[in-house]
Amino acid sequence: MNFATKVLHGSTCIDPFTGASSVPIYQASTFHQFDLDQPGTYDYARSGNPTRHALEEAIAALEGGARGFAFSSGMAAISSVFMLFSAGDHIVVAEDVYGGTFRFLTRVLSRMGISVTFVDATQTEAVREAITPATKGVYLETPSNPTLKVTDIAAVSAVAKEHGLLVIVDNTFLTPYYQRPLELGADVVIHSATKFIGGHSDVVAGLAVTRDAALGEQLYLIQNGMGAILGVQDCWLVMRGLKTLKARLDVSTKSAGILAEWLSTHPGVSRVYYTGLADHPGHLVQQQQASGHGAVLSFDVGSRERAKALFDRVKLPIVAVSLGAVETILSYPVMMSHAAMPAAEREARGITDGLIRLSAGLEDVDDLLADLKQVLDALPPLSSVQSQQSVQPQQKEAFSRA
Ligand SMILES: *Cc1c(COP(=O)(O)O)cnc(C)c1O
């Protein structure tokens, strides 16, 4: 089955009990046992519910894994997956991981006696060099946020397998439509379904899929034991979003490509980050391991003042902490996703005061282009930008806790 068909027919798309064309919201916390000697499929809804089960089967089918799990947020999925490790274990982690993942690793997991080393995972050798006798896992996110650095999943997985390590990949940016890490050697794939999979900026959710059933059993113990499950109404919304994933991404990715090309020719933009551009350092690896470049790009307008002017004047995109929705979303990494990072460190990573992230939605791309054009053309020339004072930590803190 090709992806477009699989997204609709790859797993239970009709309710197996009634034939309903959409798996209903089974708003029930517990299930009557008709015969004590023959327990039913479901007993208590933390342990299993038909609505959640349908979503879990759907994501497992799309990622090509044995078991799927739905969690109350992307961070609930991520933190639950990290519970596969034990005190004394060491994990090699890509340095560009989502800010919430970084915070969980450095402020919570560190207290549980699990240590991490952050490396530039785009350099496979850097991963190899960070492996110690205590290392049990490698955690990746590709392309990374917001400069879209690409990690070679197959190459890193091969190194990890030499050492018997678990490979975990956050696949939020590309979704199984464009990238299937389990096929490239990963053991666990994670999503913030809040983003492209849900797709409508109306639900917070997380998903995880394991390649094999034994690891799935271990993760099920954690899901059921820690209890960070996704509620049934939200499961239903995510399933509804999933049905149009391909159709939405086809449009959004096409627009992102057009916008990236156009921005890279505009004199008011100093740099564009998009893996679809031939000059992006990760372009070739991305083309090998993924079937599309996705809907997220970043561009640098040179200074905080120019970024602020753009946010003030832009009409169509919403300005928000998120991505992967029907509406185009602009965000400001310095004050949003990377607010907690020291200025020197983020600047070294290209996360400058002029950097803006764009997640293309479903608007007509000509309207988006016209909107960005009216804003960028009205800004003072890029060449007038002097060295600007960096956004101060207290200014940043006020903005986002995501
Ligand atoms: C948003 C995001 C997360 C966290 O997901 P939540 O649903 O917000 O908890 C994790 N990873 C990536 C790449 C994200 O964009």
Image: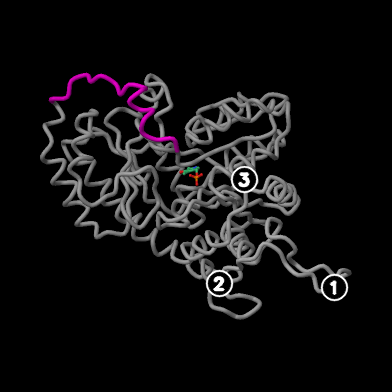
Helix, strand or loop under label 3: loop
Above or below, comparing residue 92 to residue 4 in the picture: above
Report the residue marked by disc 3: 186
State whether residue 267 is above or below residue 253: above
Closer to us: 170 or 316: 316
Does the magenta segment cover residue 200?
no
Queried on whether the Cβ of the residue with tag 1 lies below 8 angstroms from ligand 1, the answer reads: no
Prevailing SS of the magenta stretch: loop
CA gap, disc 1 and disc 2: 33 Å
Task: Please give the name of the residue rendered at 22% of the width and 19% of the height, measured from the top-left corner.
Answer: 387
Q: Residue at x 18, y 50 (%)?
A: 371
312 lies left or right of 78: left
Position of residue 324 in the picture relative to residue 270 (left or right): right
Does label 2 point to a residue whose CB lies under 8 Å from ligand 1? no
Count the labels in the image: 3
Q: Amino acid at mark 3?
A: Ala
Give coordinates of residue 145: x percent, y percent: 42, 38
Pick whichever, 158 or 191, lies toward us: 191
Comes first in the chain, label 1 or label 3: 1
Left or right position of 89 against 322: right
Local secondary structure at mark 1: loop
On residue 35, which mark appears?
1
Q: Is residue 87 above or below residue 293?
A: above
Q: Amino acid at mark 2?
A: His
* Label 1 neighbour load within 10 Å: few <14, some 14-19, many 20+: few
Reading the chain from its start, which is encountered first: label 1 or label 2? 2
Task: Please give the range of residues in magenta.
Answer: 384-402
Q: Amino acid at mark 1?
A: Asp
Mark 3 is surrounded, within 10 Å at the Cα level, by few (under 14), some (14 to 19) or many (20 or more) other residues, namely many
Residue 17, image x, y percentages: 66, 77
Q: Position of residue 364 (x, y in %)?
A: 24, 60
Residue 9: mark in rendering: 2
